[in-house]
Image: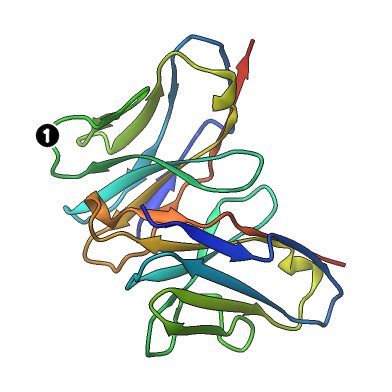
Amino acid sequence: SAVISQKPSRDICQRGTSLTIQCQVDSQVTMMFWYRQQPGQSLTLIATANQGSEATYESGFVIDKFPISRPNLTFSTLTVSNMSPEDSSIYLCSVGDRGRPGETQYFGPGTRLLVL
Amino acid sequence: AQKITQTQPGMFVQEKEAVTLDCTYDTSDQSYGLFWYKQPSSGEMIFLIYQGSYDEQNATEGRYSLNFQKARKSANLVISASQLGDSAMYFCAMRVNNAGNMLTFGGGTRLMVKP
């Protein structure tokens, strides 16, 4: 499976600021995804990052709050803008492996964000 | 819309015993996949096992097996010979094949293995 890294692994931020999270994959992948996991909760898909086009956002998530870039097939960024304490979560990127049954998604190690 | 339900918020199991984690799902689609992931306290999501809706045999991966009962819409994870390192959150997830690539996750079960 692909090796996925995320930066930063964790951060503490002040409300009103923005943080950009990077996701790097060691091979070219078509599909990259960004998930949010709020404290004690399950994972919720934020958006699908498409190479060469705008990201596709799920209901409840908007581009102004979570702008996403996908400049090539191995890299994506998620920005959490104008942060509030409610944005404190683990943010995970994942990639779909078309060579695996069900196009299994593999996840990066996550970014733990605390907003004060 | 798809829905995944994990009814056990937390479970204990004695080391070396087997444990079953429950997962039921709801979809009107016939073609779908079911996944189990493990999330240790470090926060990473580790893929464990996959079952396709048309797979006739229950999936197995080492100490993990999936008890797939399609008519009941259940996909329970069985962990044999539990180890202390199995203590973690476990998430069941579903992907409907004609609804894009998104995964819908259940609420998770926290498994605690007792020595």
Q: Amino acid at mark 1?
A: Glu
Measuring 43% from the left and 89% from the top, which residue is drawn there?
Answer: A54
Any part of residue B31 in sight: yes
Q: Residue at x 57, y 48 (%)?
A: B44
Q: How is the image coloured?
A: rainbow
Q: Identify the residue position indicated by label 1 in the image.
A: B56
Q: From where the camera sits, is residue B11 visible?
A: no
Indicate the position of residue A30 as horizontal and vertical percent values: 32, 73
Q: Residue furthest front?
A: A26
Element marked by disc 1: loop
Q: Chain of mark 1?
A: B
Residue drawn at (52%, 57%) of the image: A108
Q: Decide which of A29, B16 is in the foreground and name it.
A: A29
Q: Quadrant of residue A25?
A: bottom left
Image position of B31 (left or right of B60): left
Assess disc 1: are there few (<14), some (14-19) or many (≥20) residues with their C-alpha within 10 Å of its C-alpha. Answer: few
User: Measured along the vertical axis of the image, is residue B34 above or below residue A83?
Assistant: above
Residue B37 picture location, percent across and down? 45, 42
Q: Quadrant of the rendered structure where residue A7 is? A: bottom right
In this picture, is B42 found above or below A84? above
Horizontal side of residue A66 vs A81, given as left or right? left
The percent coordinates of residue A34 (x first, y second) are 51, 68
Residue at figure coordinates x 85%, y 76% from the top left: A15
Quadrant that contains the C terminus of chain A: bottom right
| Total number of numbered discs in the rendering | 1
Residue B65 appears at what percent x and percent y? Answer: 32, 26
